[in-house]
Image (cartoon, rainbow, N blue to C red):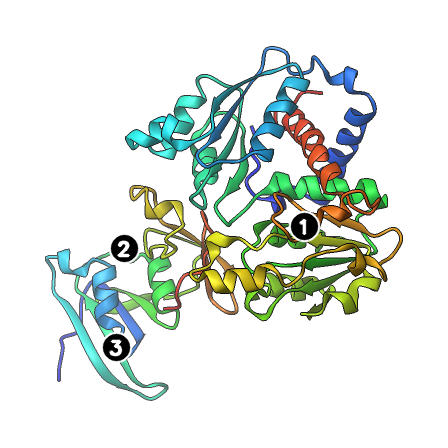
Amino acid sequence: MKIDSIKNGIVIDHITAGKGMRIYNILGLDSLDCSVALIKNVSSSKRGKKDIIKVDAEFDVDTDILGYVDPGATVNIIKNEETVEKKKLELPEKLTNVIACKNPRCITSTEQELPQIFKLTDKEKKIYRCIYCETAAAKE
Amino acid sequence: MRSLIDILELNTEEIEELIHKANDIIANPSKYSEKCRGKKLATLFFEPSTRTRLSFEAAMYELGGNVLGFSEAQSSSAAKGESVADTAKMISCYADIVAMRHPKEGAPLVAAMNATIPVINAGDGGHNHPTQTLTDLLTIYREKGRLDNLTVGFCGDLKFGRTVHSLINALSRYKNIKFVLVSPEELKLPGYVKDNLKKSGLEYVQTTDLDAVMPELDILYMTRVQRERFFNEEDYLRLRDTYILRPERLSNAKEDLSILHPLPRVNEISVAIDNDPRACYFKQALNGKFIRMALILKLLEVE
C-alpha cells in the first residue's frame, strides 16, 4: 500500500497497533479539511506492528493527550518534505477533560459541567487520580 | 487566602503550631474570647452531622464570632438544583469562612476553587475529614505528649473508615510509628493506603486477633462498622460484633493505653469502659472544638 509523503504537516509514528483510530478521534482529526491518512498494522521492525497517522497540514497536536493515550508514539513535524522536529512524548502531569471519573460518589457525577481533571500520582505505574475524589482512572 | 481540604495540605510544623495553639486556648480561654468578634462562620451541611457541626459552631461562638448556615440539603438551594460552585460564590458574599460537609466526594474542593473565603472540609462522603484527623492528633498529643515513637492500633472497619485512612496518612510522617491493623478479612485497609505506608517505610502488621496484639498498643483507635456500607444485613451484624471492646478485653492492655473513637459509637465500645481512665473518646470530642478554634484563627489569619 502506498501513501504519498506529505509536504508540510505531521506524522504520528510508532502508535501501538490498534490505537490509531482512538487517537484519530481523540485529537479531533475528523474535523480537518486536509488529507489525513490513518494506516493500521504497518510492519515494524521493533514492535511487529504499529499504526501511523499522517496529517497533510500544520496542526498543533495536543501532546498531553497523546502522551497519555500512547506514550510510546512519536510526533514528527514535517516542513518542505523534511522532518524538522521529532517530539518525544511524556506522561502529562495533568489531564483536563480527557477521561471521566467513574466514581458514582464523586461530585463530578452530579455536577456534570465541572471539568474532569486528573493528576499523575504514580509515574511508574501510570496512575492518574481524579483531583476531586482521588479515585484512580482505569488504565489505558 | 487558604482552605483546608485534605490533612496532607498541612505540613508537620503547621500541625504542631495548631496543636500548640489549641493547648493555649485550653489553658487560657478568655484570651481568645473576642478574637473573631464581627466575623461569621458559615456551616454548610448538606448531610446530617452532630459532633462536627456543633463543634464548629461552638468553636466560632467561643472565639466571639457568629454562625450562619444550614444543617441539611433540603433547607438549602441545593434542593432547587444549585451547584456547589454557585453556593460557594454566594456564601463568599455573606461570611468570612466556611465549613462544608457534603455527601459527594470532592465537593468542598469545588467550593474552595470557587469561593473567595477559606473553605474547611467538614467531611466529603467517604473521602476526607481533615478536622477529625486534627482532633485525633491533638488528642494523641495531649495524652502522650508526642506524635512519634508510638504503637497505634486501628480496629474495626479499616476499609471504609475515612478517619482511619486520614489518620494513618498523617501519622506516617512521624518517626517510629508502628501500625497494628486489626480487622475482619472483609474490612481490611485498602491497597492504596497500604502503598502509602510502604512508601513511608514504617512498620505495620495486619491481624484479625485484637486480644493478641492488645499488650503492645499505646493507642487503640476503634471504629464503627457502618451499616450503610453493606448490601446484606447478615454480613453487617456479623462484622459489627467482631470486636466489641469490653472491660475483660483490656485485662492485658497497657496501663497508659489511650482508647480513641471518632464517635458515634454503636456497640463496639461497651459503656462499661466509659469510666476507665484509658477511655479518651469523650475528651477527644471536646478536643475537636479546641482544634477547630485554632484552625479558624489560622485560616482567618487572626493572631
Judged left or right of residue B41, residue A27 is: left
Residue lying at the far front in this picture: please name it: B272
Where residue B110 appears, as percent x and y from the top left, is 43, 38
Q: What distance separates the C-alpha of mark 2 from that of mark 1?
A: 43 Å
Output the chain of dot 1: B
Residue at figure coordinates x 79%, y 27% from the top left: B26
Instruction: Say which amino acid is labelled 1.
Output: Ala
User: Which of the numbered marks, if any, corresponds to residue B170?
Assistant: 1
Where residue A65 appears, as percent x and y from the top left, is 34, 59
Disc 2 residue crowd, few under 14, some 14–19, many 20+, Cα 10 Å:
few
Output the chain of dot 3: A
Residue at figure coordinates x 10%, y 57% from the top left: A33
User: Which of the numbered marks, if any, corresponds to residue A18?
Assistant: 3
Judged left or right of residue B224, residue B229 is: left
Instruction: Say which amino acid is labelled 2.
Output: Asp
Mark 2 touches mark 3? (CB < 8 Å) = no
